[in-house]
């Protein structure tokens, strides 16, 4: 079956530090890959996505590259801000399935 | 566009009471989902509806029922609430393109 594994948190960083949140997946076929962000008290919202191998998704300074050979989609940001504090979910949508598969989420805490 | 709208936002129930969580989307999406989010457990799929007129069980369906009332609306019913159903409930919708899911703001339910 399909599955997503992401690093456990919380990840605690100082402002302007470099961020990496690891995500690996198992899926049949060639899935689309996503990162969602959940700010406190809110629902999940799409942060970025990639639909085929070697695609790079980017938004708000965050980036992730679809690596088919390592089945990974790691999230990176060069310089985090306090406002980036949130929970980040890696997810996939495999072709032929109606159900998106989510990782357990990684909490990011950024201190001033 | 309102996107995905959930009502109510907060609810406190006594054990054994019943209630219905409402969800409506205005994006003409075919597929709709109900998830619950608990600390350390990530998102768990309760039920989904791949298209109007169909519903299927997800990972944790026990104690819940759903109705896909029309293409816009997908409700979740708790017939006899239990403290184990204390959680944050999210409704989501998606379609073939774009493939990402759109989430509501959540319903925070406490069963005492």
Image (tube, coloured by chain):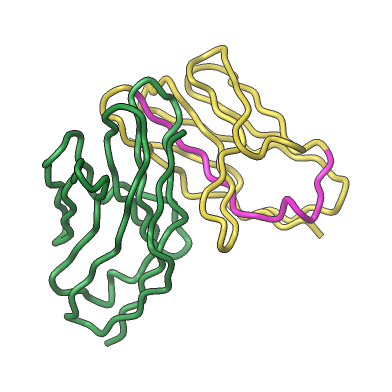
Chain colours: A green, B yellow
Quadrant, the C terminus of chain B: bottom right
Q: Is residue A75 magenta?
A: no
Who's the residue at 23% across and 48% down the image?
A70
Q: Which residues are magenta?
A: B80-95
Residue A49 or residue B92, whichever sits in front: A49
In the displayed structure, would residue B83 be above or below residue B66?
Answer: below
Q: Is residue B84 magenta?
A: yes
State which quadrant residue B21 falls in: top right
Residue B7 or residue A71, whichever sits in front: A71
Who's the residue at 77% across and 38% down the image?
B63
Quadrant, the N terminus of chain B: top left
Image position, residue A81 (x, y; %): 22, 75
Task: Specify whether A104 is left or right of A79.
Answer: right
Residue B86 or residue A30, whichever sits in front: A30
Image position, residue B39 (x, y; %): 58, 63
Who's the residue at 38% across and 39% down the image?
B102
Image position, residue B12 (x, y; %): 74, 56
Task: Specify whether B47 is left or right of A91.
Answer: right
In the displayed structure, would residue B4 be above or below residue A18?
Answer: above
Image position, residue A74 (x, y; %): 24, 56
């Amino acid at each position: 079956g399909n599955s997503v594994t992401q690093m456990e948190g919380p990840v605690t960083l100082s402002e302007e530090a470099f961020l990496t949140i690891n995500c690996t997946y198992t899926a049949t076929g060639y899935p689309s890959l996503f990162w969602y962000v959940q700010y406190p008290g809110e629902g999940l919202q799409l942060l970025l996505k990639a639909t085929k191998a070697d695609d790079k998704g980017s938004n708000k300074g965050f980036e992730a590259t679809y690596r088919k050979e390592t089945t990974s989609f790691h999230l990176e940001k060069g310089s985090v801000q306090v406002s980036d504090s949130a929970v980040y979910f890696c997810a996939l949508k495999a072709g032929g399935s109606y159900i998106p598969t989510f990782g357990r989420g990684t909490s990011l805490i950024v201190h001033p | 566009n309102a996107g995905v709208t959930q009502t109510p936002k907060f609810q406190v129930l006594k054990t054994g009471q019943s209630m219905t969580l409402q969800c409506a989307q205005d994006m003409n999406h075919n597929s709709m989902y109900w998830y619950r989010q608990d600390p350390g457990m990530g998102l768990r799929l309760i039920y989904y509806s791949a298209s109007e007129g169909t519903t299927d069980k997800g990972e944790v369906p026990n104690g819940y029922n759903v109705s896909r009332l029309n293409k816009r609306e997908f409700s979740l019913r708790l017939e006899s609430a239990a403290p184990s159903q204390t959680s944050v409930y999210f409704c989501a919708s998606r379609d073939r393109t774009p493939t990402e899911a759109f989430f509501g703001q959540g319903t925070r339910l406490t069963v005492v």
